[in-house]
Amino acid sequence: MKTKKNIIELNRNYLKENYYNISSINGELYELYCYNKILDCNYKNINIIKSKKAKEGKFGNLEYSKNGKILCVSNNIALAEYDILGIKSNTIYWWEVTKHAKIENDFILKTKIKYELLKKLFKYYDIEFKLIAPKIYSKLAEFAIEIIKEPLYEYYNKKIKISNNIKNAMSLKTLSEKCNKYDYINDVIKMSLEYYDNMKKDIIDNEIIIKRIYNLKTINSNCVEYFDLQKKKNKIQFINKNILNTDREIFNNRIIQEIVEIKKKLILHITRLSDLLF
């Protein structure tokens, strides 16, 4: 029998779950609304890259996700997702969309990581970044902000579609042809060698793209030693049928991917580890 207290708690949980569902849906609608705005205003004659409802496809380090968003990928690892990209002359334009007033530090860190990745992909281009938001947020004062008011979601949801100007947008394949190739695992291995073998501990001080570096002498053992750059901690990853880790939790898939890709890279370079430092 459900007590009054239990019923109140169930209602709270229902409202909470639905609030997050509605918020997530409205976030997607707002992102699409902003994408259409950028497409429709012929923004400074910038070549906007096709996104959102684009078909899946892989083009070097760039690819479309299942829902048509632009991903930066290296060594089968998704490193970042970009809301809106464009190009004109020697400048890459990038917009990140948010409608949330409560901006977490994680969002700011991810934005900085995305910026650094673009610098690696487009070494000879300037990167111009703007954050799109419905209003100015004090926590984002370090970023240039473009204000786009939120639509009436109930009305917009009924008429949702990609602007016809999408046909004039540049394909991701064309953009990828202007990219430099970026090998994330090569960078992980290089930094791992410098840190663990050459004892250059300061090499990690300003690094934000790489999340973990590994003691390569342990990479084929049942206990892989690694250093978490964000938490600034040495850790041991127990390999037990790729299921459990030191905290007896489900394995972090990103760690598995990195270990697997490092092993593949080392097998390909069977002469010496230093061969990777090219």
Image (cartoon, grey):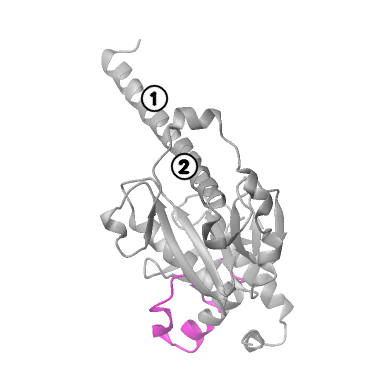
Which amino acid type is shown beneath numbered disc 2? Tyr
Residue range highlighted in magenta: 193-222
Q: In the image, is residue 72 part of the stretch drawn in magenta?
A: no
The image quadrant that residue 89 belongs to is: bottom right
Q: Residue at x 30, y 52 (%)?
A: 136
Instruction: Evaluate whether residue 211 shows in this view.
Output: no
Q: Is residue 4 above or below residue 185?
A: above
The image quadrant that residue 59 belongs to is: bottom right
The image quadrant that residue 187 belongs to is: bottom right
Q: In the figure, is residue 273 to the left or right of 153? A: right
Q: Which residue was labeled with disc 2?
A: 30
Q: What whole-number distance in Å separates the C-alpha atoms at marks 2 and 1?
A: 24 Å
Q: In the image, is residue 197 part of the stretch drawn in magenta?
A: yes
Q: Which residue was labeled with disc 1?
A: 14
Instruction: Describe the element under mark 1 as helix, strand or loop.
Output: helix
Q: Position of residue 61 (x, y in %)?
A: 65, 66
Q: In the figure, is residue 224 to the left or right of 54? A: left
Which amino acid type is shown beneath numbered disc 1? Tyr
Look at the image and tell me in which quarter the N terminus lies: top left
Look at the image and tell me in which quarter the C terminus lies: bottom right
Q: Position of residue 219 (x, y in %)?
A: 59, 72
Closer to us: 40 or 14: 40
Instruction: Evaluate whether residue 141 shows in this view.
Output: yes
Dot 1: few (<14), some (14–19), or many (≥20) neighbours within 10 Å? few
Q: Position of residue 5 (x, y in %)?
A: 26, 18
Instruction: Describe the element under mark 2 as helix, strand or loop.
Output: helix
Q: Is residue 159 above or below residue 221?
A: above
Choose the circle earlier in sequence order: 2 or 1. Answer: 1
Pointers 2 and 1 in contact (CB under 8 A)?
A: no
